[in-house]
Image (cartoon, rainbow, N blue to C red):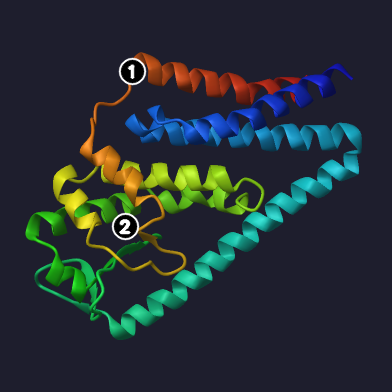
Amino acid sequence: MNTMVHLVITLVVSLAAIGPLAGARWVWRSPRTGILLWQLLMLTIVLCVLGIAFLTIPELGVTVAIALVGVATHHWLGTLRTRRRHRDVLSLVARVDAAVPGVLVLDHPLTVAYCVPGLRPRVVLSSGALAALTRPELAAVLAHERAHAKERHDLVLLPFLVLRPIFPTAAASVALLVEMRADECAAPSPLATALRRFTAVVPPGALGIVDAAVLARLQRLAGTREPLPALVRWGVVLAGLTLVTTPLSFLVW
């Protein structure tokens, strides 16, 4: 019974932390720290739910665990199928351009830029984007998209997309932090100018430069890019680890 009480308390505390963390601006200064904190928070919630279910009815715990794995697998396989179809379409309609080596170009008047992630990632630009962007802006956009591919932000987002029906705020917050992290890999001033030129959404399964929080990204690019002090970052990580080890310690013992 004592274990159950601790798991419930930890779950309540974790759920209560979602709102304040989603509204926090300090994580914008160090997006990777913010992403890690969200990962630890969501892992804590999942562990608490599984622990409570197992302690209540063992069969229920098994069912919940299987359901989580099943939903995650279904989502991931669906995403892989979508990307494969999109790659097939790109192989038919996209072209290469000497002005942007290693990038696929779509002949389309709208300004579009996105990354199709995977083991062989592809960065895609529209001809409209090539015409609209200056050389520095284009370099910033490509740096942003290549950061998505290099750091496998699609895998970072996967668990949050799976849990999005239950925790939409968490999914939106992490998606914003992922974009801000990619922004850190580009020159801020040209990227901010380029952001104002993009008007089209990206295809399903892709990671693009256009999102629902462009204003927040522009505010960050226009402000300070000074990261959080190392002591603060380590303190945040330690707090997250303490939170996630709480249900683990009670479940193990």
- The residue type indicated by label 2 comes to Ile
Q: Position of residue 63 (x, y in %)?
A: 82, 49
Residue lying at the far bottom of the rendered structure: 92
**Helix, strand or loop under label 1:** helix
Q: Can the viewer see residue 122 in this picture?
A: no
Front residue (pair 190, 86): 190
**Badge 2 vs badge 1, beta-carbon distance below 8 Å:** no
Kind of residue indicated by mark 1: Ala
Whole-percent x, y for residue 8 in the image: 78, 26
Seen from the viewer's position, the closer of residues 40 and 201 is: 201
Pick the front one: 8 or 78? 8
**Residue tagged 1:** 230
Of the two numbered discs 2 and 1 on the same chain, state the one appearing first in sequence: 2
- The structure residue drawn at horizontal position 42% and vertical position 18%, both measured from the top left corner, is 234
Give the number of the disc on residue 200: none
Q: In the image, is 125 to the left or to the right of 152?
A: left
Q: Quadrant of residue 106?
A: bottom left
SS state under label 2:
loop
Q: Which residue is mark 2?
A: 209
Image quarter hosting the N terminus: top right
Crowding at mark 1 (Cα within 10 Å: few <14, some 14-19, many 20+): few
Q: Is residue 91 left or right of residue 103?
A: right
Distance of label 2 from label 1 (alpha carbons): 29 Å
Residue sitting at x 38%, y 67%:
202
10 Å crowding of disc 2: few (<14), some (14-19), many (20+): many
